[in-house]
Amino acid sequence: MFDLLKKKTSVKKIAKFLNYDYKGKDFDVFSPCSLSNIKNNSILFYTDIINYKFNLKDNIDYDLKKLSNFKNIVIIIPKNMKKNFSVPTIPSDNPRLDFQRVVLKYFSVSKFKPNIHKTAIIEKNTSIGSDVYIGSNCFIGNGVKIGNRTKILSNTVIYGDTIIGSDCVISSNTTIGSEGFGFSFNEDDFVHFAHLGSIVIGSDVWIGSNCTIERAQLDETFIGDHVKIDDLVHIAHNVIIGNFSQITGGTVISGRAKIGEGCWISPNSTIDNGCEIGDNCIVGISCLIRKNFPKNSVIVGNPGKILRKNTKV
């Protein structure tokens, strides 16, 4: 959702923004870069942790010796790191987070400005907030309510009885508010369970591309504030997801399941009908949840079981 902004910014200015004391050489950097593709006059970061909340380790080892082959680079590193670097460093409590803050502040610009594309279809009785972006070929159905500054990208479909908060991002080709998969067998045919409920999505929610979020059968499908949902995620009818949880790619959350606040659901996980996961849980890669789990659980396997308690939070 952003374009690279090439902008000359001094190292001391960046350190001041991060509220860190920097006493090294001052020079200008022009762009961010990664340890896999280092460039002169750039800023980068190093940490062996990819998720500070749950203390999840990175799987890649980087050759830090090659930093000395480049000019005018500065690297954000962990405060407690004892290794000596051949280039200027900015010590940080969370290098990944601080690097992201620097990129957003100095080196990126939003790709999508407030606008409703001429090919978007907006039905009657909708409520669209201020400074909203709706991309090409979107469909917004009757009764949909969209909060301020929310961005809805191309080819997204949102049906009625859906409320979306402010400052959300909904990526391309996602469908929100469709009928759920509810059928009962009647001797020689299936009878569909008409979905008559609603969807409520909080503020500052990110929903990736090619996701499906189903309307509740009778009550409400609920996604809390600050929830982040990756691409290719399916969320069935009447699911409840608590604030600040993250749902990664390929996850399937079946009907009436409940996920607490601050959880991390790893790729390709499946959560069965009606199962509940407490606050601050980690669900491991390709895990199958077939029962309820208490808060602060680290859950792995098929079927899922508790590996240990999460003492980090």
Image (spheres, helix red, strand yellow):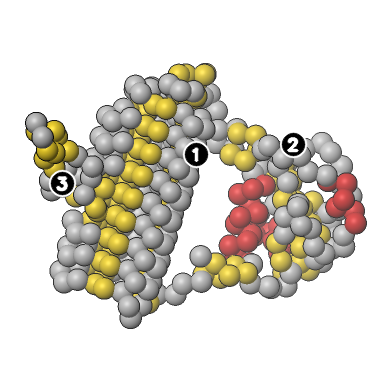
Query: Pointer 3: what residue?
Result: 195
Q: Quadrant of residue 280?
A: top left
Amino acid type for the residue under numbered disc 3: His
Q: Of the residues under marks 1 and 2, which one precedes in the sequence? A: 2
Amino acid type for the residue under numbered disc 2: Asn
Placement of 4 over or under 244, stated as above or below: below
Name which residue lies at 60% across and 34% down: 56
Q: Residues within 10 Å of mark 3 (few under 14, many from 20)?
A: some
Q: From mark 1 to mark 2, how far is it between C-alphas?
A: 31 Å
Residue 202: x and y in percent read 32, 51
Which dot marks residue 80?
A: 2
User: Which of the two residues, 112 or 286, is positioned nearer the viewer here?
Assistant: 286
Which dot marks residue 267?
A: 1
Q: Is residue 306 visible?
A: yes
Residue 106: x and y in percent read 63, 67
Q: Of the residues under marks 2 and 3, which one precedes in the sequence? A: 2
Amino acid type for the residue under numbered disc 1: Pro
Residue 27: x and y in percent read 82, 66
Name which residue lies at 9% across and 31% down: 187
